[in-house]
């Protein structure tokens, strides 16, 4: 026989409720610094009345939502859901590394290497797919540098190239 209460609660509801409540409390605590309260003005005519009313509602309803989620949640399911959410952070880390590497080795080389590495990371191993990913990376560089004329600084590695080739690489790749 299944537990009917936990069947109604979706995984991640507790985490969402906690994040929403924390965010609402932070916004409410910052409200006095963000709005002015005028003297000799009715409460509903105050510039901060409606933001305060909405934030008080957010905190109140957020707290109620959080309390009902705690009561009904299966914490093992919540932790497994959080693990799934955390896995997506890997790609944000890949992107941050890419942003750091581009000024070092250049836009073209960084794009080709990272497109190849991410394709490999996603489980594609066939040479045709790996070449297609590098071709897509090369086409992206051409599109951004030539057609769209996006100014991306050349890599520090370009300084070691001969003069003519260095200028060409900095301007085009």
Image (cartoon, rainbow, N blue to C red):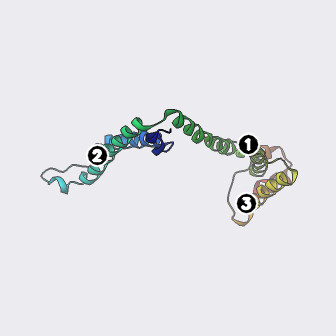
- Tell which residue pokes out farthest to the front in this image: 1
Determine whether the residue tagged by mark 3 lies in a helix, strand or loop.
helix
Q: Which residue is mark 1?
A: 104
* Residue pointed to by mark 3: 145
| Circle 2: element type | helix
As drawn, the residue found furthest toward the left would be 40
**Dot in front, 3 or 2:** 2
The mark found on residue 80 in the picture is none
> Residue 89 versus residue 157: which sits nearer the camera?
89
In depth, the one of 93 and 9 nearer the eye is 9
**Which is nearer the N-term, disc 1 or disc 2?**
2
Q: CA distance from mark 3 to mark 2?
A: 50 Å
Eye-nearest disc, 1 or 2: 2
Residue wearing tag 2: 56
- Tag count in the figure? 3
Identify the residue at image location x=69%, y=63%: 149
Few, some or many residues within 10 Å of mark 3 (<14, 14–19, 20+):
some
Q: Please provide percent x and percent y for residue 138.
A: 79, 57
| Figure check: 148 above or below 18 | below
Instruction: Specify the quadrant of the image occupied by residue 131.
Output: bottom right
Left or right, 15 with reference to 59: right
Q: Mark 1 falls on what kind of element?
A: helix
Q: Earlier in the sequence, mark 3 or mark 2?
A: 2
Name the residue located 79 percent from the left edge and 48 percent from the top edge: 124
Gap between marks 1 and 2 measured at Cα: 49 Å
- Residue 162 position, x and y percent, is 86, 49
């Amino acid at each position: 026989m299944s537990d009917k209460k936990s069947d109604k609660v979706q995984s991640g509801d507790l985490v969402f409720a906690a994040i929403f409540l924390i965010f609402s409390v932070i916004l409410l605590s910052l409200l006095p610094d963000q709005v002015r309260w005028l003297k000799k003005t009715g409460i509903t005519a105050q510039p901060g009345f409606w933001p305060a009313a909405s934030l008080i509602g957010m905190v109140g309803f957020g707290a109620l939502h959080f309390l009902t989620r705690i009561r009904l949640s299966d914490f093992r399911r919540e932790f497994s859901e959080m693990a799934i959410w955390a896995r997506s952070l890997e790609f944000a880390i890949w992107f941050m590394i890419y942003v750091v590497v581009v000024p070092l080795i250049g836009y073209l080389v960084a794009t080709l290497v990272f497109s190849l590495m991410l394709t490999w990371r996603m489980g594609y191993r066939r040479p045709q797919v790996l070449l297609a990913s590098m071709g897509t990376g090369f086409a992206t560089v051409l599109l951004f540098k030539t057609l769209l004329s996006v100014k991306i600084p050349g890599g520090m590695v370009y300084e070691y190239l001969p003069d003519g080739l260095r200028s060409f690489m900095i301007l085009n790749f």
